[in-house]
Amino acid sequence: VSNASVSLGAVYCIGRNYAQHAAELNNPVPSEPIVFMKSAAAIRGLSPQPMAFASEAYDHEVEVVLQIGKRCELGSAPGWEAISAITLGLDLTRREEQNRLKTLGLPWENAKNFAGSGVLAQWQPIQAFPQPDGIEFFLKVRGETRQQGNSKDMLFSVPTILRHLCARLALNSGDVIFTGTPPGVGKLRVGDPFEIGFVGGKAFAGQL
Ligand code: ZN
């Protein structure tokens, strides 16, 4: 699920990065990026694979996903030049479990980091995106459009996210960042066929 030359590193995810998505879950708009992580073992490709909690329905979150192409030192403020490839992914979420953990003030990992919870389409070189901060993208489930968004609507831009992360640690080639989901989250079940794609560009068929 990564460029042939790059192995998967750390997987960072940004929460509530679209105002309309924060609103649909009755969450306040954050004043700084909300960061959580998935393990490499949680990441899978588009074809069906065994999933943890496979009897559950998951909330789908389609997201623009970035691949770091070169090391970014602690304390640096990298921009788009640090990104080597872009794809789309699904951040699958056990929403009821997340709500339970939120109520208790506990971390979200049990709701976000489990086998199969991070789905990645094929990486596209950054050069394929003349305007990478205005990427329009969608998710269809069983042929029905569920989510559509544009990365220009991110609350925190890619350089802001990179600076926020690099204030805390170095980023390495192969690290990836899920950049948050636009509104329209809903349920996805094991066996559901879906399509994630760039509006006017490549689309990728998958099955949970
Ligand atoms: Zn997400």
Image (spheres, rainbow, N blue to C red):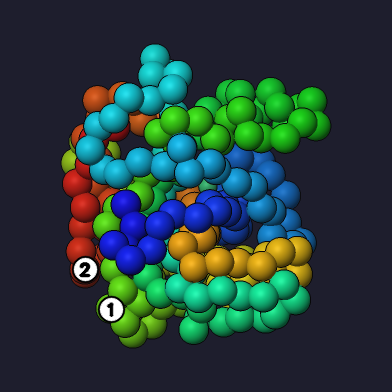
Above or below: residue 29 compared with residue 82: above
Judging depth in this view, the residue of 155 and 35 nearest the camera is 35
Category of crowding for the residue at label 1, using alpha-carbon neighbours closer than 10 angstroms: few (below 14), some (14–19), many (at least 20)? few
| Residue corresponding to mark 2 | 201
Q: Is residue 103 left or right of residue 92?
A: right
Mark 1 in CB contact with mark 2 (< 8 angstroms): yes
Label 1 element class: helix
Category of crowding for the residue at label 2, using alpha-carbon neighbours closer than 10 angstroms: few (below 14), some (14–19), many (at least 20)? few
Judging depth in this view, the residue of 43 and 187 nearest the camera is 43
The answer to whether residue 143 of the structure is visible from this angle is: yes
Give the residue type at disc 1.
Ala
Q: Is residue 151 left or right of residue 201?
A: right
Whether label 2 lies within 8 Å of ligand 1 gets the answer no
When asked about the image quadrant of residue 111, the answer is: top right
Residue 44, labelled with which disc? none
The answer to whether residue 123 of the structure is visible from this angle is: no
